[in-house]
Image: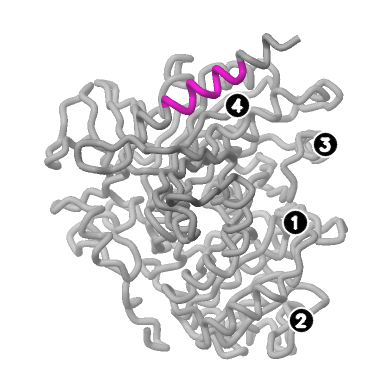
Amino acid sequence: MSPAGGPLEGFRPYRPEAAALYRRKRWWLGLTMGDTLDKSADLYPRKEALVGWDGDGSEQRYTYAELRRRVDVMAFELIRAGFVIGDRVLLQLANRPEFVISYYALQKAGLVMVLLTVNHLAREVGHLARLTQPKGWIVASRYRKTDNSPLIAQVRADVPALDRVIVLGDSVPEGCLSFSTLQETPATAEQVRIALEAARPDPGAVCQILPSGGTTGLPKGAPRTHNDYICNIEYKSKAWDLNVTDRVLVGTTVGHNLALLVTLTASVFQGGSMVLLDSTRPEDVCRTIQDERVTATGLVPTLMSRLVSFEGLDQYDLSSLAKVYVGAANSPPELVRSAESRLGCRYTNAFGMVEGPCSQSRPDDPEDIVCNTIGRPVCPYDELVTLDPEGRQTPRGVEGELAARGPGVFTGYFNNPAANQQAFTPDGFFRTGDLAMIDERGVIRITGRLKDIIIRGGENIAARDVEDLISTHPAVEYVAVVGLPDPDLGEVVCAVIKPRSGMDLDHAAVVAHLEGAEAAKALIPARTEVVDDIPLTPAGKADKKVLKEQIIAKLAREAGGREQTP
């Protein structure tokens, strides 16, 4: 990557003829992420843009003019600190105003944001750092009760090229920069303006790299350009009628694409107001909706289920809430109906991926579509089709693998030719790994998955990732990981283990082993089944369908036994 901002090595560009079409048709707007903030600040300078709370619970409120000033100052100071156009920077902050300020400062400085969740540990952070070769990392010194000093020290030791760690909080390790030093500048407003104009990236440049869920092993990086990501933002927000009048609760973690795309960047694009909440407790969600007169929010089905079943729901005035977007996992029809009934709002049933394919129900769709499908593609210029095992398009109404290409769909994983060879058809369709049927109306219904993933609370967990970790235990001969249905989380991880001859193993030992390996919390099984033998398919692989059926039947028997016990 040159200081002048040349092509990002490891990124597969769009085909020239496709890019020319997208620009000519204005499916790509030719804006940068920083431009979207500037436009809203020019239109609505005195309007409240952002409400949030810092780590001590102190309230912070910013108008669009104030938010732009803070973003511009930080972007300028990042440039003064030695960052140049195209440098990668890891961003690992919670749902706090500092995330929004950092995100747009990175964009306006022409840097490439690499998204992390606050729950990523050294293993995941180190992996993504080695993949993307970042120059910087923005991270908090603490998150809730967790001291991040050991995490910071380990990653710095593992990734020597990471030479600028910016720490938010009072405790800044030696050799790191304090976040607060980037919040003020001795420069004049004119000097800041000139520097940021020079740093403005090309709209076709990569603006961020998002960790891809649903993969085997550690996350892959999905690079997104300003053009294609803003295409997602524009059409997705229009599809569920997010607009300038909305006050939007950012209630899922900003470290996941649902919050970043659906509630945060969409609010800025439309000139709406964001309310950031770093809690998923139903009472906190309800109180925030009531006090801030929230009109819209984006949630995963798990959080929506907790909200509608919350016994204290009637104690709060939620009359302002007009619409909810629910994605990242399947929404059962009964959840859709109960949410609309108890909350009195419109439910958008949605599908989205960090790679770009997006589909969702519309405000005027009938109940059948909202309850049982993921509606239609949000962007009418994206092509979503189904493919047979040979990669041929199947007719309407015939099940196949969902695949997509278009102005809102990425072109390939970062620095990963092998994955791209598998993920794309010769004519450029991205294979999602989901099985689907598309009817004559263009309405999509997800029917299954090809990828071996477990969706826990809206988070995709690769079964192989858990299997690889558990298999390092000396007592494990063979392990297969499956997802079990869960009324709260949708699915939970279950490890089925055949131990080595003469060796004992139980759930506590598995958990202790994974915690010792610093595995992310999501990778730790909720249940462990120790068996004498594991059924295999004709190809010699674990027959996970049979395993899952056996465990579900066992759980049913156990539940029946408990019900009969006096």
Going from N to C along the chain, the mark reached first, 1 or 2, is 1
How many residues crowd around disc 2 within 10 Å: few (fewer than 14), some, or many (20 or more)?
A: some
Residue positioned most to the front: 502
Going from N to C along the chain, the mark reached first, 2 or 4, is 2
Q: CA distance from mark 1 to mark 2?
A: 34 Å
- The answer, for residue 230, to whether it is visible in the render is no
Numbered disc in front, either 1 or 3: 3
Instruction: Specify the segment rendered in magenta.
Output: 549-559
Identify the mark at residue 46; answer none if there is no mark: 1
* Side of 296 relative to 85 (left or right): right
In the rendered image, which residue does mark 2 sit on? 172
In the rendered image, which residue does mark 3 sit on? 287
Task: Identify the secondary structure beneath mark 4.
Answer: loop
Residue type for callout 2: Val
x%, y% of residue 463? 43, 47
Quarter of the rendering containing residue 147: bottom right
Task: Identify the secondary structure beneath mark 1.
Answer: loop
Whether pointer 2 and pointer 4 mark residues with C-beta atoms closer than 8 Å, the reply is no
Whether pointer 4 and pointer 1 mark residues with C-beta atoms closer than 8 Å, the reply is no
Task: Identify the secondary structure beneath mark 3.
Answer: helix
Identify the mark at residue 487; answer none if there is no mark: 4
Give the quarter of the figure containing the C terminus: top right
Identify whether 362 is placed above or below 472. above
Q: CA distance from mark 3 to mark 2?
A: 33 Å
